[in-house]
Image (spheres, rainbow, N blue to C red):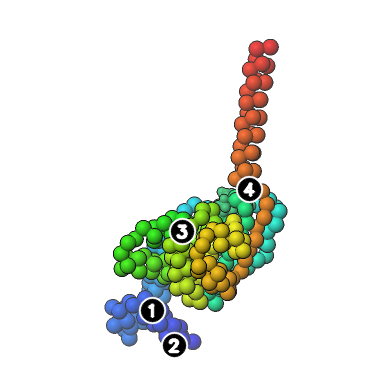
Amino acid sequence: MIQNNLEHMRARALALRLNGLLEHWGEVGAADWVAPLIQWEEDERARRSLARRLRDAHLGKFRALADFDWTWPRRIERAAIEELMSLSFMKDASNVVFLGPNGVGKSTLAMNVAHQALVQGHTVLFASASQMLGELAALDSDSMLRRRLRRYTQPEVLVIDEVGYLSYSNRHADLLFELVSRRYQNHSTIVTTNRPFAEWSEVFPNAACVVSLVDRLMHRAEVIAVDGESYRLKEARERNEARARQRGAKKAGREGVGA
Ligand SMILES: Nc1ncnc2c1ncn2[C@@H]1O[C@H](COP(=O)(O)OP(=O)(O)OP(=O)(O)O)[C@@H](O)[C@H]1O
């Protein structure tokens, strides 16, 4: 038992590359202070790794799933979304597509899944479709393009947000196809879009690669459809109603004092 424990601790020290400690393992391996030292080192490295991956992911601020109002959307598959949080879709590099109209929480849900992947130790990159494709299309040297494509190919989860709000050129379509092909069967891609795939030929008009692009994205993909009224509009309406009530209360107060 004690021997097993020592072996296990030595393996952890090896994984941490604590070479100085390993060099003197025969003398100090069984000492009381070794276990906490290894634990501190593991905790600190995990903390730094998460901080680094969070910084590189460019997720920005988002509402946590715990504060998501499941009763607001007319249609939402809560169980399917909660299942996504287990990240099982990443095991076979499946993709996820959040489909629905404006303001129903597609980006928020995608960001929650992406954040869960970060917490579980994966690398993530969040990008808006137009910013990403615009940036790639502006690169005129092949070597820069290859390098930049790698930035979007390597993360274990790439979120491409808001495909479909603008219409794109053939060059944009080719770049998205290139990216999706490189990630295909290697890493998961999460897409948010307001347009069903049947309409992507309008998002990428005249682009020859649209059918192949959709084919690769959809080969292994879970489509999560969310439908309903915009939560942004709901919040704006509630803010206006609260302001109107405040104004009404102030007016009533003034009239009350004057009376
Ligand atoms: N059901 C919900 N409960 C709580 N907040 C929500 C809900 N749905 C959306 N929101 C909030 O509304 C705002 C808009 O949501 P989000 O950007 O995720 O929607 P979207 O579907 O991606 O919209 P768009 O397509 O316009 O980008 C965010 O601040 C988000 O936190």
> Which x, y percent locates residue 130?
46, 56
> How many numbered markers are drawn?
4
Among numbered discs 3 and 2, the one appearing first in the sequence: 2
Mark 4–mark 2 distance (CA, rounded to whole Å): 61 Å
Q: Is the residue indicated by label 1 positioned so its CB lies within 8 Å of ligand 1?
A: no
Secondary structure type for disc 4: loop
Nearest-to-viewer mark from 1 and 3:
3
Secondary structure type for disc 3: loop
Answer few, some or many: residues within 10 Å of disc 3's Cα (few below 14, many 20 plus, some between 14 and 19): some
Q: Residue 169 carries which label?
A: 3
Nearest-to-viewer mark from 3 and 2:
3
Name the residue carrying label 1: 15
Answer few, some or many: residues within 10 Å of disc 2's Cα (few below 14, many 20 plus, some between 14 and 19): few
Q: What residue type is labelled 1?
A: Ala
Name the residue carrying label 2: 3
Mark 1–mark 2 distance (CA, rounded to whole Å): 18 Å
Mark 4–mark 1 distance (CA, rounded to whole Å): 48 Å
Horizontal relation, residue 120 to residue 146: left or right: right
> Which x, y percent locates residue 13?
37, 78
Name the residue carrying label 4: 230
> Where, by quadrant of the figure, is residue 45 drawn?
bottom left
Q: Which residue is at a point 58% across and 74% down the rendered structure image?
A: 219
